[in-house]
Amino acid sequence: MNRSDLYSLTPLLILSSAAILNFFSISIKRNHKVIFAITVLSLIGDFIFLTSYSLYHQQHIDPLLVVDGFGIFNIGLILLTTLVVALMSYAYFEQREERKEEYYILLILAALGACIMVISKHFVSFFLGLEVLSVSLYSLIAYLRTRERSDEAGIKYLILAAFSSAFLLFGMSLIYATTGKMDFGGIGYYLTTTQDIPLIMMAGLGMLIVGAGFKLGVVPFHMWTPDVYEGAPTPVTAFIATVSKGGMIALLVRFFNAINGYQYESFTNLFTVLSIASMFVGNILALRQTNLKRILAYSSISHIGYLLVAFLSGGSMGAQATTFYLVAYFITTLGAFGIIATLSDQHRDAELIDDYRGLLWRRPLTAVAFSAMLLSLAGIPLTAGFIAKFYVITAGIGTQHWLLVFCLVVNSVIGLYYYIKIIAVMFDQKLQIKSAKELHPLVYVISSVTIAVLAVFLFWLGVSPEGMLSLIDDVI
Amino acid sequence: MQPQNGIPIDYYIWLAAALFTIGVLGVLYRRNAIIIFMCIELMLNAVNVLLVAFSTYLNDAAGQVFVFFIMAVAAAEVAVGLAILIMMYRNTKTTDINILNRLKW
Amino acid sequence: MKDFLWLIPTLPFLGACILIISGNANLPRRAVSIVGCGSVGAAAILTIVIMIDFLTTGQIPEYTVIVNWFSVDNLSVPIALHLDTLSLVFVFVITFVGFLIHVYSIEFMHHDESFARFFAYLNLFVSAMLMLVLADSLILMYLGWEGVGLCSYLLIGFWYEEEKNGYAARKAFIITRIGDTALAVGLFMLFAELGTLRIQDILTLAPQQWATGSTTPVTICLLLLGGAVGKSAQFPLQTWLPDAMAGPSPVSALIHAATMVTAGVYLIARMNGLYVLAPQAQLWVGIVGAITLLIAGCSALTQYDLKRVLAYSTISQIGYMFLALGIGAWSSAVFHFMIHAFFKALLFLAAGAVIMALHHEHDMFKMGGLRKQMPAVFATFLIGSASLAALPLISAGFYSKDQIIWLSFASQQSNIWFFLAAVVGAFITAIYTFRMVFLTFYGEAKTSVSHMPGNLITQPLVILAVLALFAGFIELPHTFGHVTLFSDLFSTTLPPVTLRPNVESHEWIIQTSTGLLTLVGIAMAYYFYVIQPKIADDIHASTIETHRFWYAGWRFDSLYDAIIVKPILFFARVNKHDFIDKLYSALVELSEMMSALFSRSQNGILRWYIMGIVAGAVIIITFTLIITP
């Protein structure tokens, strides 16, 4: 490893050191504020460091990693997302009596795992990144021990994730058995030299999709999503919904481009089926749901379905559409969960639709921000979600995926129903008096400012997306 | 395909597949969370067998290195998993996964 | 200066946003007036600066400011504004007259509870109207088109507590929707045929694509005419405008006289290149104008309500503009639009001041004698009326209307019927205008004056009166003066009118005779309503069939009620349990059922979830194995 390798890996090193620093800090004295400050500062510092890279940075750290524009962009996205999650966690955890300091270590480690995933070009780094992320997530989900049902969510996620990563590993080993290679480039090279792909290899790729599909929560591997979303602490839910899924998507894009998977009709057909099933099942399941976190879980299933449309379009257009969609989806999801987190009290999360009845009259700005997030999820113009969806549809039409585009449009309509339903509830006049013990208002300032910034980004991307589009264009 | 020791390499694939399937079925059929963990370990070990076999067969060390990573990760997973299981046991006094159905619909 | 063009529609929009967000309760009235008038005033100043810039540099302005919203793949979605002399004239009228009306509204609406809401709507209207005339593409223009329709609806029904106001608002909205639908279909056809909706592209592509008089451009032009007819309250969709007078007087002045109702004129003038290709459609524009100006003029003769007289006269004057468009006198139509905006806004504002002074009394027969009591309003109203009646030589309306009458005689595309309609219309206009003046301001006072208009009302009136008198002098006919400042502006944007050979010598005859006709009309009005008011009272009291027929707007409302509304209501009753709705409710039920069915799968049992993964894995592996590449 030489100096330029080290330079390229500095963002990851900063994250690891932040985790270790937090360890030491806890061993000296438990102080939520200090840990929070260390976490936030290191994430910000890391992001600032990241901006020092040029967009065309390209550093292969053979055989495991490659730090290129795409990777850097995604690391930046992950860092910012983690930062937002950390910011919204402070008020959320401050209300609770349990120990909250280790939470930030786990959060940083999970982000580290996701960062490794998005720059990996080898099965080993892929697997390690994934597992660092997953193992941190197990503990994060079950973090609040006294919280109702968090043990259940933790166990469910643990068993299902371990089970599916066994599939992933088996797929990797089968691919290794046929190709003798574990780096994406080598596998891609093998595929170009072979006319007839062995059945074992195909089975291996299939199992790989099972593992990846679980992380993404596509149908039929989606069933954990609502349960875990509901059971996990809200900031953790936001993290799962964004970083964990986004990291996997970025990795899939890289892997599929490396092996040029788009040329195999069986895979594109397979993803088409997965995508359509995800859209329909996610949206239809959300229709009668009354728990907001579960609604967002179902909506995330369908959103991954939309994302797969862009992913399936392939090429640079597909990758751009995917990335832009991820950015828009990250902002919206973070905003939505951030609002749920701020409205939660020390006993339970504000997760039932009825908790939002008449919110507009109680907290007008929060309600407006939440409406904006929901409208963006629904893809209404002037929000980031619209541009993202438009981009996806353009990509789909450009590659003549008519069926997918048709399903996407139909599902946008179905989705509109439950997004608007929530907004309608917020506008309901019947006031519900809520008497919760309020914390020091300063605690909420952090969360509120975070949400405000997210809302501004949401509109900014919706009104003038050119900057972000050209940035994405440059990194891909 | 005849490696040095005389066992055809295909057999390893079948062995691994069989082990993996046993693991899958175990996860499906058992109700005790600890045994489910053991079955997942079995699945991982099937992977390990396959990787080691082909690593030797292909004269490529990467497979064996991967095996060590998998073992380490599996250990970490089990450590965290058992901790969560204990937490669950404290709350419910059982390790039967069938009682976990409060999160639904 | 052109870099600031985008500010012109944006400023009023921002004003509207601020006022909508702050609502009625949160801002003091002073702040609301400052925001409301200030945003439009700033836009007006910008417009004037741009105008001066061009008048001094002598260039004909023509440029496009593009804000690229986003571009994906090959598709880019630009938001472009296009300013040329045509849009400049409209922008000037909208911002300048709009500003005066805003100022007037401060006092007029001062006691209204929903002060902020009123200014929010007005600002929104101004910004939508500016978007309409500045749009570079028809799609953006359509946005403005619908935006002004929405604001018109909101403002007609501004006093929504009264049911009939809400009814008038709905009527205006629905009837204009008929035209809008035609317009939308026309836009679709244009896009299908030419593949673009950028106005400049259309105007360059169309002549290459189509021969003159071929079916496609004629169809498209007729559809666009349908949109224009709806928005501009022309025959046969004119019935909404008189009822629209339910809105506050400044609204009638701004929307239903000066700006929005002339959007149809703008549309046709803007698409002149298409109409040149479709002479049949252009003839229909003229026919619509001629019919409208006559029937609306006759209706204006018989109204009691001061504002309804003005409403019918608006319809009639826009009929003149359509007539001008129909005979290819493009710049005359725009000239008449501008002058009309000045004097009609003036008349509405002055009428508003009168109505306010007389406890919201609308009936002219209950007014009278206001000449002495409200001298300022009387003077300005008189000037506006002179302009409307086209009093020869001294009023601006004379120069604009005279041009149209002259060209309806002289233009190649005109015919004798158009000319006759124009002349008769001018005569009727003179009668009903001065009938209105004499009834309102002469005779004995029948209602006492309660509220004298203050400065904020009189000053806009005075400014508009000056314009209504002198704005005509920028364009003088050949026979004397021969000033063509205004039509020179359009030398590149609008095609010139082609005259029939050897008609120039008749110009002075026609001018003199129409001038005399106007004077005769005024004299008749004076005779009937001042010298011998008994006759007028008799006519008023009598129930002559024609009188009632005209009073009811030629009974178009009853006609439409009988042939359209009643059958539709009948079908609606028959189809009470909408059978098409069944399809949609079935879809809803299906979704609900599916939702219930699917949610069975989310039963919270971990082993079931594991089963899901295994099943998925089996399916995927089988899938990949069976359909191997």
Image (spheres, helix red, strand yellow):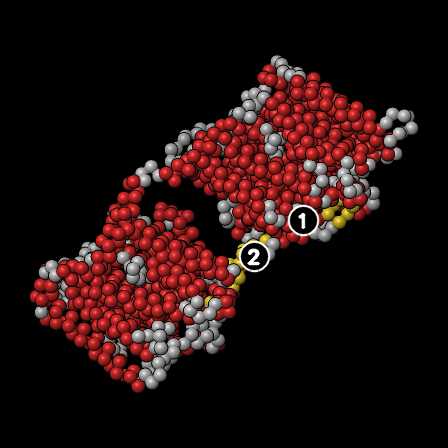
> What's the distance in space between the residues labelled 1 and 2, CA to CA?
20 Å
> Which x, y percent locates residue C492?
46, 75
Q: Residues within 10 Å of mark 1 (few under 14, many from 20)?
A: some
Q: Which image quadrant for residue A334?
A: top right
Q: Which image quadrant for residue A179?
A: top right
Chain ID of residue with mark 2: C
Q: Residues within 10 Å of mark 2 (few under 14, many from 20)?
A: few
Look at the picture and state if C420 lies above or below A395: below
Q: Residue at point 83% right, 31% down?
A: B54
Along the line of sight, which residue is nearer the eye, A59 or C136? C136
Q: Residue at point 26% right, 83% down?
A: C509
- The residue carrying mark 1 is A315
* Label 2 residue SS: strand
- The residue carrying mark 2 is C76
* Label 1 residue SS: helix
Q: Which image quadrant for residue C559?
A: bottom left
Horizontal side of A218 relative to C51 (left or right) equals: right
Look at the picture and state if B84 lies above or below C169: above
Q: Residue at point 53% right, 62% down?
A: C66
Amino acid type, residue under disc 1 in the picture: Gly
Residue A369 makes an appearance in the image: no
**Circles 1 and 2 in contact, beta carbons < 8 Å:** no
Amino acid type, residue under disc 2 in the picture: Ser
Q: Residue furthest right?
A: B4
Q: Residue at point 21% right, 75% down?
A: C518
Chain ID of residue with mark 1: A
The C terminus of chain C, quarter of image: top right
